[in-house]
Image (spheres, helix red, strand yellow):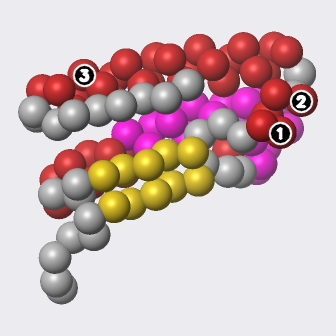
Amino acid sequence: AGPPPRHVAIIMDGNRRFGARAFGPERRLEGHAAGARKLGEVVDWCLGRGVAELTVFAFSTENWDRDAGEVAALMREFVARAAEVERRCVERGIRCRILC
């Protein structure tokens, strides 16, 4: 199958739409948590295969135009997940840089 990719880049998009389909329109924001859990699986996949760099674009400038409550929920989710990703990388001796 060849060597693993050196660099994987992900644009996280559509979590709210996924949430509306999976959980119903009134619970659409749960899609963000589902996307964050899936990102954890992707991080594990990359770590397990020796991917040297992972770039994740998780929040676009358009997201700032959303309802203040949704932005706050996104930021809480981001901080919680970023800390977990950083911890897992450090445990494996991998340098991790998270930019906000």
Bounds of the magenta span? 16-40
Please state which of residues 86 and 35 is positioned toward the viewer in this rendering.
86
In the rendered image of this protein, does residue 5 appear above or below residue 15? Answer: below
| Residue 26, magenta (yes or no) | yes
Secondary element at tag 3: helix
Residue 4 visible from this viewpoint:
yes
Which residue is the site of mark 1? 62
Q: Amino acid at mark 3?
A: Arg
Which residue is the site of mark 2? 65
Q: Is 64 positioned to the left or the right of 96 in the image?
A: right
Mark 1 Cα shell of 10 Å, populated few (<14), some (14-19), many (≥20): few
Residue drawn at (59%, 40%) of the image: 58
Secondary element at tag 2: helix
In the rendered image of this protein, does residue 58 appear above or below residue 77? Answer: below
Which residue is the site of mark 3? 87
Q: Quadrant of residue 76?
A: top right
Secondary element at tag 1: helix
